[in-house]
Image (cartoon, coloured by chain):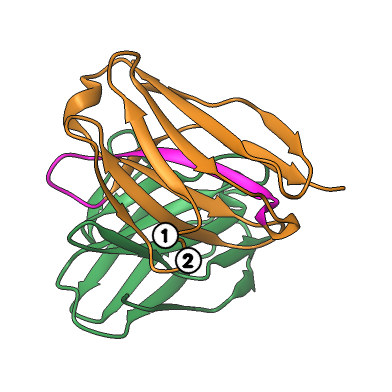
Chain colours: A orange, B green
Amino acid sequence: EVQLLQPGAEVKKPGESLKISCKSSGYDFTTYWIAWVRQMPGKGLEWMGIIYPGDSDVRYGPSFQGLVTISADKSINTAYLQWRSLKSSDTAIYFCARRGVGSGRLDYWGQGTLVTVSS
Amino acid sequence: DIQMTQSPSSLSASVGDRVTITCQARQDISNFLNWYQQKPGKAPKLLIYDASNLETGVPSRFSGSGSGTDFSFTISSLQPEDIATYYCQQYDNLFLTFGPGTKVDI
């Protein structure tokens, strides 16, 4: 069974750094792209970027380039989303999702990590 | 990036009604269009991929059509469990864009 496991919540202060994880199981982690999607409170879905864990090839959405870092560790089947200096506007739910082979569909999703940035 | 619009932004219908949502792309995206359902507090769920293909396990009352710039998503007979927000999503090689969403309630 394909599963993407994310921590439920993180609480941070403005200016702090954060790295959230997405641990995959049930499939070959190195042969599927993993995407990150942001959902701000009460808002829609925004695609942030995507990584191919097999060779760590990464692409970022225009709104997120330079603001976050996407990485992966194929030895432990885990993808990451990282911030160097959080702002209150980073408060949101962050989902990871697997991109299906030969398609742009996101066929399996993590349950999301709620990141709260508040002083 | 390719911008997507959806209409309506919200709708209210009765159980058993036929519900249709439209999605428009700013440029030709062939059939590279997917539809998702998101219930409150949950992750999105893939329903339709490549404009008209039903994802495995999804009820047949859900369907999609269209190509180029204009797409539609239909629930043939609305059920109480279909209360959710629906998003279209295009893909241009590795780059994705979501529509703004349509909230469906009863």
Bounds of the magenta segment: A90-104
Answer whether residue A111 is visible to the viewer in this image: no
Give me the residue at 87% from left, 47% from top: A119
The answer to which quarter of the image holds residue B65 is: bottom left
Numbered tag placed on residue A106 in the rendering: none
> Does the residue at mark 1 contact the one at mark 2 (Cβ under 8 Å)?
yes
| Magenta-span inclusion, residue B25 | no
Relative image position of residue A84 (x, y in whole percent):
57, 45
The answer to which quarter of the image holds residue B13 is: bottom right
Answer whether residue B68 is visible to the viewer in this image: yes
| Magenta-span inclusion, residue A94 | yes
Q: Amino acid at mark 2?
A: Arg
Classify mark 2: helix, strand or loop: loop
Disc 2 target residue: B18
Along the horizontal axis of the image, is B92 left or right of B15? left
Write down the chain letter for disc 2. Answer: B
Which class describes the residues within 10 Å of circle 1: few (<14), some (14-19), or many (20+)?
A: some
B46, above or below B63, in the image = above
Mark 1 vs mark 2: which is more N-terminal? 2
Give me the residue at 25% from left, 39% from top: A33
Give me the residue at 31% from left, 85% from top: B26
Q: Amino acid at mark 1?
A: Ser
Write down the chain letter for disc 1. Answer: B
Q: Quadrant of the N terminus of chain A?
A: top left
A17, above or below B36, in the image = above
Disc 1 target residue: B76
Give me the residue at 32% from left, 47% from top: A50
Classify mark 1: helix, strand or loop: loop
Query: Furthest residue to the right?
Result: A119
